[in-house]
Image: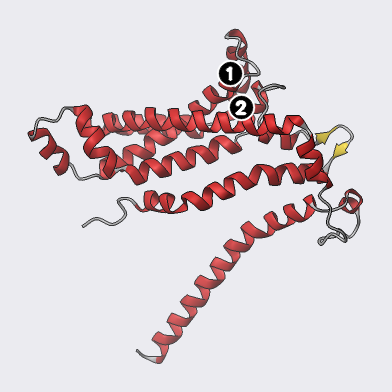
Amino acid sequence: MTGSGRLRKVILRVLRVLALAIAISAVLIPLAYLVLNSLKLQREMYTIPPIIIPSRITFEHFQAAFDNPRTVRFLTNSLIVTSVTTGITVVVSTLAAYGLARLGLRARYLSLIVFIFLFIRFYPRITTVIPYFLVMREFGLLDTVWAIIIGHLGITIPFVTWLMLIVFQDLPREVEEAAMVDGANPLQRFWRVALPMAAPGVASAAILTAFLSWNEFLIASSVAKRQAQVMSIAVAGFVTDRGVQWGPMAAMAVIMIVPMILFALFVQRYLIRGITLGAVKG
């Protein structure tokens, strides 16, 4: 290797390390500052210049959060909404995507369906809040977890169907054709052949759905006023007409984030497999 080649290799390595350091800092610095704010005394929230490191560690904000019985209800509602939304989304979207991938539709019709899915997923959600509120009121579902779940399904099902459609299209059809020769019906081919091969994609779709449902705020805030409130609403509830209660808000935000961090650490290998599924073809 020539001197210029070695220099280029060193520069590329330095740039990669620098990019990785910037990305990690962009994620960890706000998280660290949030945790530090949750451990500060209330009076240190308003000092100028701001105090980054608390002079004394206090857990009073966390104690107040856990002493409040509503915190347990917030967590329970979030777990119910996220679990049910993820389960229904994965089942419905996986079946729909497999059907679309194997129907043999013309490319332009399939492209139209995909466009509709993406349009539903990415159009401004704020435009549907008032109509959705009125619909839920007519059905008597206001302030219930089902109102939040149904709203989340309208977001997650189109997105996951599109995602799983890509996964099923990338799977080799020869294995399914062999199963067809052996007499397997469409449901058997899906359950015994296609689904095991697409398992990493299904896992990543479930993970992304769980994150989206857990963090969603707009729909939940529009239909849940008291009994069905979730963690995202609880965090925003510390913004009052008398000011922002920074300490309690930071503590509640940490309580909300910790379950998702633990969940991400547990399932990260499945997410990586799902993202890379079909990236390398032999």
Q: Quadrant of residue 6?
A: bottom left
Vertical position of residue 140 compared to residue 265: above or below: above
Which quadrant holds the N terminus? Answer: bottom left
Q: Is residue 183 left or right of residue 96?
A: left
The residue at which mark 2 appears reads as 219
What residue is rendered at 29% in x and 32% in y? 110
Q: Residue 78: in sight, yes or no?
A: yes
Residue at the left extreme, as displayed:
181
Instruction: Give the residue at mark 1.
Output: 132
Q: Quadrant of the C terminus?
A: bottom left
Near mark 2 (Cα within 10 A), the count class, few <14, some 14-19 or many ≥20, is: many
Across and down, in percent, residue 4 comes to 41, 88
To which quarter of the image does residue 112 belong?
top left
| Front in this rendered view, residue 158 or 116 | 158
SS of the residue under disc 2? helix
Expressed as whole percent of the image width and height from the top left, the position of residue 3 reads 41, 91
Q: Is residue 226 left or right of residue 169?
A: right
Q: Is residue 250 above or below residue 134?
A: below
Q: How is the image coloured?
A: secondary structure
Image point 28% across, 57% down: which residue? Answer: 280
Identify the residue at image location x=62%, y=11%. Answer: 137
Residue 19: x, y in percent? 54, 67
Q: Amino acid at mark 2?
A: Ile
Please tell me which residue is depicted at 36% across the width and 44% down the height of the picture.
Answer: 201
